[in-house]
Image (spheres, rainbow, N blue to C red):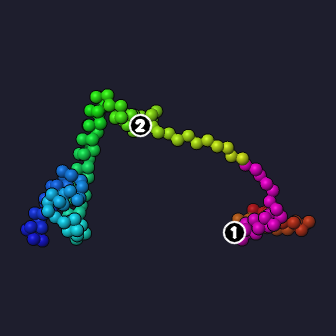
């Protein structure tokens, strides 16, 4: 790895700690996106370091956004207040109400359906089918 490539990788890692957006970081460092993705593919340690830096930067931005949201709530911004309550309080969360009626009717099997079920059970080995004195099938477990 050349000295320039090491420097460019270090610049990218530094930039990822400031912004978690690959396109922006690459532009600011003068490294083409294709090169960045090739480096990731060829250098597992670099890829892991980039992922860690991006995750850290994302966490920082999330903290800043939450801070701004709290500031907006303190300024009595109703949109911010509603968002916070819907996201953090179960009483205000968006709910879906489902209602309906289930009608369940039990219908007797036809003789043909009974024969198919009996044969399936016999083939599965779950029950043994034997004929009774009237020539009809009885199940024995």
Q: Is residue 14 visible?
A: yes
Quadrant location of the N terminus in the rendered image: bottom left
- Label pair 1/2, CB-CB below 8 angstroms: no
Q: In the image, which residues are magenta?
A: 104-125
Residue 92 sits in quarter: top left
**Would you place residue 88 above or below residue 114 in this image?**
above
Q: Is most of the magenta stretch helix, strand or loop?
A: helix
Is residue 128 within the magenta segment?
no
The tag on residue 86 is 2
Quadrant location of the C terminus in the rendered image: bottom right
Q: Residue at x 76, y 67 (%)?
A: 116
Q: Residues within 10 Å of mark 1 (few under 14, many from 20)?
A: few
Q: Residue at x 83, y 64 (%)?
A: 111
Q: Is residue 45 visible?
A: no
Q: Residue at x 67, y 43 (%)?
A: 101
**Would you place residue 115 above or below residue 85 in this image?**
below
- 99 lies left or right of 119: left
Is residue 106 within the magenta segment?
yes
The residue indicated by pointer 1 is 124
Task: Label 2: state its secondary structure.
Answer: helix
Residue nearest the viewer, comparing 47 with 94: 94
Residue 5 horizontal/vertical position (percent): 12, 67
């Amino acid at each position: 790895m050349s000295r320039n490539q090491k420097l460019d990788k270090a610049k990218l890692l530094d930039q990822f700690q400031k912004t978690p957006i690959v396109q922006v970081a690459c532009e600011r460092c003068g490294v083409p996106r294709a090169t960045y993705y090739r480096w990731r593919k060829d250098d597992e340690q670099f890829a892991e370091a980039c992922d860690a830096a991006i995750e850290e930067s994302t966490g920082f931005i999330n903290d800043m956004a939450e801070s701004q949201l709290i500031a907006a709530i303190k300024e009595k911004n109703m949109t911010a207040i509603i968002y916070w309550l819907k996201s953090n309080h179960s009483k205000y969360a968006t709910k879906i109400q489902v209602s309906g009626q289930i009608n369940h009717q039990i219908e007797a099997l036809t003789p043909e359906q009974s024969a198919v079920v009996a044969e399936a059970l016999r083939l599965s080995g779950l029950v043994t089918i034997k004929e009774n004195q009237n020539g009809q099938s009885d199940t024995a477990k």
